[in-house]
Image (tube, grey):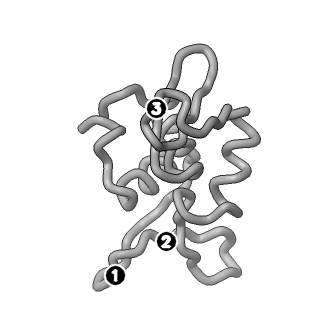
Amino acid sequence: MKVTDLPLEQLDYWVAKARGIDAYTPEGSADLYYVAAAALPPRKWNPTRYWSQGGPIIQEMRIDLNWDTEGTGEWSASIDPDVLAQGPTVLEAAMRAYVISRFGDEL
């Protein structure tokens, strides 16, 4: 499947995989969770929605963000040298670019 076509829940999963985070969906839930530390309860993993999770990835990867650069009405996220992704939100565009940078355009 192309990274650009991934639903947000699957995109979050692939971001976790790229980060080496063991994310899972508990039975009866649609949400993705991870364990930050053994003494802590599981937490939701949603870097496409939570700045506290997606923001550090943007900073670490130096993801360049621009609004509507190609007339799409969406955010563009790029990672040098040649990764470009788009999305309706900054976090979605950035996480798509991040996954592409780690795994390529298709999974």
Residue at (43, 36) in percent of width and height? 72
Q: Position of residue 75 (x, y in %)?
A: 54, 42
Q: Could you tell me how far apart the alpha carbons at marks 1 and 2 are, in whole angstroms?
A: 10 Å
**In the drawing, does residue 78 fall left or right of residue 88?**
right
Q: Taking 100 as reference, is 56 above or below it?
A: below
Q: Position of residue 97 (x, y in %)?
A: 51, 35
Q: CA distance from mark 3 to mark 2?
A: 36 Å
In depth, the one of 46 and 77 nearer the eye is: 77
The residue that disc 2 covers is 33
**What residue would you read off at disc 1?**
29
Farthest residue to the front: give it.
Answer: 71
Residue ID for mark 3: 71
Q: Quadrant of residue 51?
A: bottom right
Badge 1 local density, few (<14 within 10 Å), some, or many (20+)?
A: few
Query: Front-most of 76 and 55?
Result: 76
Residue at x 31% of width, y 30% of height = 106
Q: Position of residue 3 (x, y in %)?
A: 35, 38
In the displayed structure, does residue 40 sit left or right of residue 48?
Answer: right
Q: Are marks 1 and 2 in contact (CB under 8 Å)?
A: yes
- Amino acid type for the residue under numbered disc 1: Ser
**Residue at figure coordinates x 44%, y 69% from the top left:** 32
Mark 3 lies on a secondary structure that is: loop
Three-letter amino acid code of the residue under disc 3 = Gly
**How far separated are the C-alphas under marks 3 and 1?**
37 Å
